[in-house]
Amino acid sequence: MKIETLTIGGEILNGRILDTNFHYLARQLNRLGVPPMWHSTVPDRRELLLSALKNALARAEGIIVTGGLGGTPDDITRRTLAQALGRRLVLREDVRLEIERIYRERGRTPPPSAEGLALVPQGAEILPNPVGMAPGILLPTPAGGFLVALPGVPEEMRALVERFVLPFIERRLGVARGWELTLRTAGVPETVLADRIGPVQPDGSEVAYLPQLGGVDLRLVRRPDAELTREEFDGWTKEILDKLGDIVYATGEVPLEQRVGELALAAKARLAVAESITGGGVGAALTRVPGSSAYFLGAVTAYDNEIKQRLLGVSLGTLLNHGAVSAQVAEAMAVGVRRITGSDVAISTTGVAGPDGATAEKPVGLVYLGIASAKGESHLRRIFPGRSRESVTQRAVFAGLWLLYRHLAGLPIDGTPLWSEGPRPGSVGN
């Protein structure tokens, strides 16, 4: 099935917002084995939208349009859809009554412009909006395909996609669909992954390497037209998993912070964080996971040296002798936050994010991570050279999560090349 996605919105073309709707749609369609073949973005101009729709109708079996389904007078999407498909625009009384009901429930009187939300091309199937007012629209195309028009508000678009659009496409696909499995890895670059996997792969399969901050997502795909059976696909993916070993921390879309939480729950380990360079980023990542209060006690953002001393107990001598960016301070920060929170495991981050504050001995991108547990304390040294301030801090957040993951999984914390240097001699490494 050839699918085209079309985004309507001048605010995307002028760079004011990112097209997160397309990003979401592309990922969902990839999971079904039908990635979009084309994508277009057009402003709210009738002639350009009409041209884009005609191009899509000429080449795609399925068209998904996002944006422009408002009830404001300047909205041209409904009229242009009707024109492209050769249909009249009609007022759907059932939709109008539903919109009035929503307004009343919110204690408001519907404005005259709200009636525009009930205007749809004749013969359209209405997709009720579970989180907003503007419904989605599903229409057959002259060539026997389909066109779906969705509101541009991300929350509303996603709700309609999950409730109606994906099940509809799955039904049309039947058994003619692809499969995919994402392996989330950390610690090694793409070239190393490729060497470990090897060049041999089954006919009809694909391997995509998707670098992320701190790791690489490996996407294993069975194309819709392949003769590869499910058993053969599963055997191939298992073989790759066996080759990669403990550098795979999750399958699917599971983020690293969720895996850390799962391991902490299994070990009944309470976690805490002391952060300098990451400015609360590690704690924020951990608390994004629902239920994290069961294992995460809290964090101290100790950016200033006085806070490191007063709250975490880092000695003035350690700071003066080694500097805030040092293995000794990283370890002392981890010990300090573990002491004041009563956690089982604590980590810390300190480093040089740049662009200022670097020296020859301590360049931009130098990060130290400390860890403290009942087994003792340790540190890791990491360098992210040639990176922006934002990139350094984000990578340091990932490195902190990876350190927690390795520790909780019972793996050596210096067990992969993610770390430029391992623990210092005599320190605890797991």
Image (cartoon, rainbow, N blue to C red):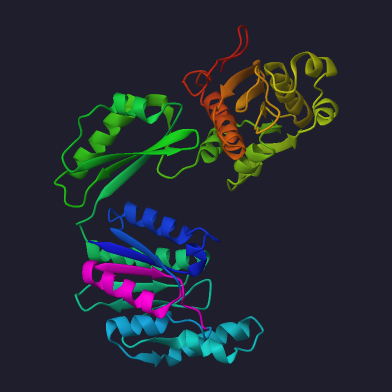
Q: Dividing the picture into quarters, in which one does residue 389 lie?
A: top right
Q: Where is residue 327 drawn, in percent x and y?
A: 67, 17
Looking at the rendering, which quadrant does residue 119 occupy?
bottom left
Horizontal side of 81 relative to 341 (left or right) equals left
Q: Residue at x 30, y 30 (%)?
A: 240
Viewer-nearest residue: 87 or 196: 87
Q: Is residue 265 visible?
A: no
The answer to whether any part of residue 135 appears in the image is: yes
Is 277 left or right of 134, judged from the image as shown?
A: right
Residue that appears at 64% across and 80% down: 106
Q: Quadrant of residue 398?
A: top right
| Percent x, y of residue 280 | 69, 39
Where residue 418 sits: x, y (%)?
A: 49, 24
Residue drawn at x 33%, y 43% as measured from the top left: 181
153 relative position to 219: left or right: right
Highlighted magenta segment, given as a residue range: 44-71
Indicate whether 192 appears above or below 84.
Answer: above
Quarter the N terminus occupies = bottom left
